[in-house]
Amino acid sequence: QAIFAQALCFAKLANSVRVAHAPKHQLVKMGRRPARCYRYAHGKPYPKSRFCRGVPDPKIRIFDCGKKKQPCDDFPACAHLVVDENQQLTSECLEAARIATNKYMITNAGRDFFHIRIRPHPYHVLRINKTLSCAGADRLSTGMRGAYGKPYGTAARVKIGQVLISIRTKEEKVQVAAEALRRAKFKFAGRQKVHVSSKMGFTPFGKDEYNKWQACGRLIPNGIDVKWLSSRGPLHRLIGRAAAAELAALDLAQ
């Protein structure tokens, strides 16, 4: 035990000597730059490409949560979070908003009664001109020489009126969805508004219009959406192949 204690003491001493003689710039680690530095868009979009390499992966990797394969008839109500400013939203705040919305909906609406979709994707690459701010930095850093920054993160550029988050759910749980979106607002800078939609789920049709076209047989299920059949095209697409064949037979008989 005495030998083990002596060896441990020597190891601690060697480690302290190594830290003491290390250069000061190796001891300082920069934290993340606050998002207010990248809130507003300046210049052109800067996407990831063969010229812009080494971009870190965005923090948000999942853009759909909940029962994302349910047909639109199952979730007729819908609520949106609409942005009210022209700004940039980092991938970190989009992921934070997704987690907050998903957790509130699971707790208060139930795991099987909603579908959340994050609408913007963070394609714009943020840059940073890393400089050393520690002792001896004046001998190591170059100041503003070659100041074009390295890729640092990603953000989504959004405009006024653009939808950030959409939730489709049951009619009786639409207020829970509105409250979940209100809580997600605290993850973003600027102003956002919660809008309870009058449309049928994620479709472009109002509820009365949806029921009318569905009764006419003009809507075809298309996953979480529907396809609308116009009055153009072959007749059998509107009235069915059997009825079209009967009409064709009557024409031939006449």
Image (spheres, rainbow, N blue to C red):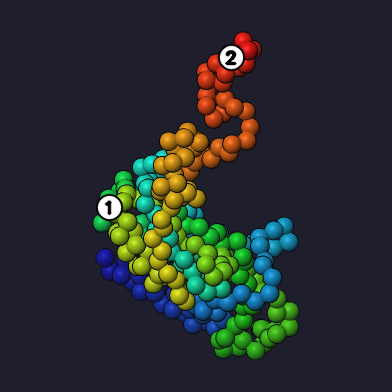
Tell me the residue at 39%/72% (across/down): 186
Q: Is residue 190 left or right of residue 43?
A: left
Residue type beneath disc 2: Leu
Q: Assign a secondary structure to mark 2.
A: helix
Tell me the residue at 69%/58% (across/down): 49
Front-most of residues 53 and 12: 53
Which of the 4 quarters of the picture holds residue 147? bottom right
Q: Any mark on residue 172, and which?
A: 1
Classify 228 as above or below 56.
above
Classify 215 as above or below 83.
above
Which of the 4 quarters of the picture holds residue 195? bottom left
Residue type beneath disc 1: Glu
Which of the 4 quarters of the picture holds residue 138? bottom right
Residue 172 seen: yes
Q: Is residue 74 left or right of residue 234?
A: left
Say which label, 1 or 2, has the lower sequence index. 1
Residue on which the image places disc 2: 250
Residue 116 seen: no
The percent position of residue 145, horizontal first and vertical second, equals 73, 83
